[in-house]
Image (spheres, rainbow, N blue to C red):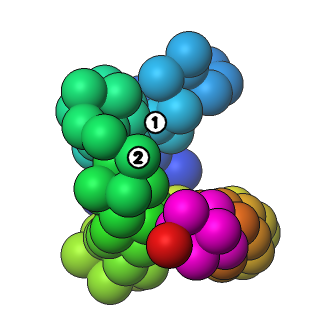
């Protein structure tokens, strides 16, 4: 995608209810549904891996310039916070 008009046509008007910023990337939502079916520790571990994986995907797999730099910084900070808190939950269950 070469210009912002092309990017705007791909991105939705805002965040959808499933937490994906662009359509088709529903990894966090699917992982959350699967985690609900798993017992405590495996469910939390799946959420840590899914959150980290989606962050890695947003930073490494998408072409440069596809997502705004401010969003990538926000995503990094929120992903680190979520992974840290879920890890603390895992330790508390151990």
Q: Is residue 1 left or right of residue 44?
A: left
Camera-nearest label, 2 or 1: 2
Q: Is residue 76 above or below residue 93?
A: below
Q: Is residue 60 above or below residue 30?
A: below
Mark 1, Cα crowd under 10 Å, few <14 / some 14-19 / many 20+, is some
Q: Is residue 42 left or right of residue 9?
A: left
Point out the tag, 2 or 1, that comes first from the N-terminus.
Answer: 1
Mark 2, Cα crowd under 10 Å, few <14 / some 14-19 / many 20+, is few
Q: Label the magenta part by its dominant secondary structure.
A: helix
Q: Which residues are magenta?
A: 88-93
Q: Is residue 20 above or below residue 72?
A: above
Q: Is residue 23 left or right of residue 78?
A: left
**Percent coordinates x, y for residue 33 in the rendering:** 31, 26
Q: Is residue 55 left or right of residue 81?
A: left
Q: Which residue is mark 1?
A: 20
Quarter of the image where one finds residue 16: top right
Name which residue lies at 55% across and 63% down.
93
Point out which mark residue 40 bears. Answer: 2
Residue 10 visible in the displayed image: no
């Amino acid at each position: 995608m070469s210009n912002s008009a092309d990017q705007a046509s791909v991105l939705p008007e805002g965040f959808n209810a499933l937490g994906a910023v662009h359509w088709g990337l529903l990894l966090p939502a699917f992982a959350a549904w699967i985690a609900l079916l798993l017992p405590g520790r495996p469910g939390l571990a799946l959420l840590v891996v899914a959150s980290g994986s989606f962050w890695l995907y947003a930073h490494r797999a998408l072409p440069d310039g596809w997502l705004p730099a401010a969003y990538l910084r926000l995503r990094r900070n929120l992903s680190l916070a979520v992974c840290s808190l879920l890890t603390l939950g895992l330790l508390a269950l151990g």
